[in-house]
Image (spheres, grey):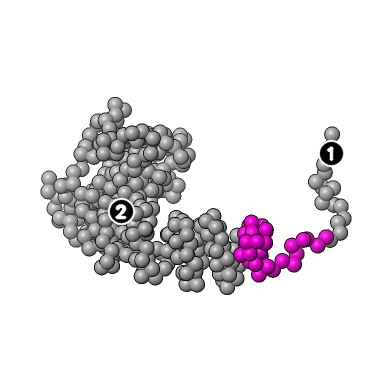
Amino acid sequence: MDWVSHVDNKLQYREYVCPVDANESLDDLICLYTNKKSKRVGYAGKKLKKIFLDLPCVEQRKVGLALLSGGLTDSEWVCKRLDNYKESFDKEWKINWHPCYEKAVEECWNKYHGMYCGKLLIQFLPEDIVRKHIDELTTDKDFYFYLSRRFVNTSWFKLDIEKLKSCTYINAYLSVMIKTNDGISEEEARLLLYQWIAYIAVTYAKGTNAHTNENIFYSYKSKRMRVINAWGLDTALYYLLCMNHHKVVAEFLEWDNNIFNQFYDVYRDSELGTTEIVCEDFTDTIIDNFPSDLRYLLSLNEEYYLYILTPGQPFTIPRFRNTGSNKKEEDIPKYIPRSNVKENNTIVYSSQKTISKDSYERMVDSNPTLKNLIEQLNLSPTNLNEERRE
C-alpha cells in the first residue's frame, strides 16, 4: 500500500528549480503562435487565451490580432470576448473591442462565417462594411436580431417583423419594436404578456420541463407569490409602458392582483409561516383564472415546438423542433387541446375592456416595482377613461 502525506509534502524543504518557460515573453508566445511551422502553435495558443482578458489594453490587442489569424476555434474564441459582456449584475459592462480589429474580423468572416464573428461584425464594423455582407448575414436568422437592433431606423434596412419574431424571445422583440414608429398593437401587447405566463405555467411551474428548482413566481423580498414576479416580466411591462400601452398593463396588473387575492384567501399568513408555498398550487390558480379567449396558449404542442428558453426568455413565437420526422411545420398546430387543461373561466379580461384612472392607480400602488418604473419614466395613464364602461 502506498502512503501519502500532504502535510509532509508541504513541510519538506525544496530547492528552487527554474521553470522551462520562465523566460518566455508575450512576444515569444505570439511568434510561436503565428509561425505555423513552430510546432508549438497549440501550446502558445492555450497560454495566450489564458492571459488574454487580464492583459493591459495594448498587449491585449496584440494577442487578439494574433488569435484572429488562427483557425476557426481560436478566432471564434477571441471574437466572443471582444463583444460587450457583463460578468455579473454588480459589475459594469466590459468592451474589449478596438477599431484595430476591423480588418482581421472581416477576413475571419470571409474565411469561416463564424457565429461570434458575424455578431461582432454587425455590432462594431462600419455600416458600409456590414452592408457589403448584408446578403450573407440576413440569410442566417441568428443574426437578424442584431441587424434589426442596430439598423432598424436606417433608410436602407427594411424590417421584416415576422422574421424578427421567429428569432427572438419577447423582451428582445420588444426592444426593437419600441424603436419603430408604430410599435406593436394593443392586442399583440396583451397576447405577449399572457403568452409569457402561459409558457411558464405549463413548461416550468407545472414541472413538465423543470430546469430550475427555484420558485419562479416567489419574491424573497416581499415573501409573496405574484404573477408580476416572473423573471424578466418587469422589463416587458417597461417596454409596453414606453409604447403607451397603459391600459394593457393596468388590466394585466388587475388580473395579477386577483390571482394574488384568490391564492392568499386559501393560504393565510398563519399557514404560510409554517408550510412551504408550493409553486404548483399558485400555478393552478393562474390556470383556473386564465382569460377565456387566450386559454389556447396553455395547450402546448411540446412534441413538435419549443416555446421557452428560460423563465425569462419565452420565444416571441414557438419554434419548430427538428424531430427528424417528415412532417412540415405548416401542417402541425402550435397549440393542441389537452384534457388536463382546466376550463374554469372565473376571471375574463378581453382586449375591449377599459379601466378607470383610479383603478389603474390602485393597481400601480399595489406593486412598488411598477410604481418606481413609471415615476422614473415620468409616465402617466393619460389614455385611460375617467369612468369605467361596463
Disc 1 target residue:
3
Disc 2 target residue:
164
Q: Residues within 10 Å of mark 2 (few under 14, many from 20)?
A: many
The x, y position of residue 146, in whole percent, is 37, 59
Residue 32 covered by magenta stretch: yes
- Name which residue lies at 18% across and 50% down: 355
Q: How many marks?
A: 2
Looking at this view, name the residue that lies furthest to the top. Answer: 339
Looking at this view, name the residue that lies furthest to the left. Answer: 389
Q: Nearer the viewer, residue 199 or 332?
A: 332
The x, y position of residue 135, in whole percent, is 33, 59
The x, y position of residue 15, in whole percent, is 86, 59
Q: Against 12, is 319 above or below?
A: above
Q: Could you tell me the amino acid type at mark 1?
A: Trp
- Determine the image quadrant of residue 334: top left
Please tell me whether mark 1 or mark 2 is closer to you in this view.
Answer: 2
- Determine the image quadrant of residue 57: bottom right
Q: Nearer the viewer, residue 146 or 229?
A: 146
- Name which residue lies at 23% across and 49% down: 188
Q: Report the disc number at residue 278.
A: none
Looking at this view, name the residue that lies furthest to the front. Answer: 37
Q: Residues within 10 Å of mark 1 (few under 14, many from 20)?
A: few
The x, y position of residue 292, in whole percent, is 21, 37
Horizontal relation, residue 388 to residue 46: left or right: left
Q: Could you tell me the amino acid type at mark 2?
A: Leu
Give the magenta part as a residue range: 17-46
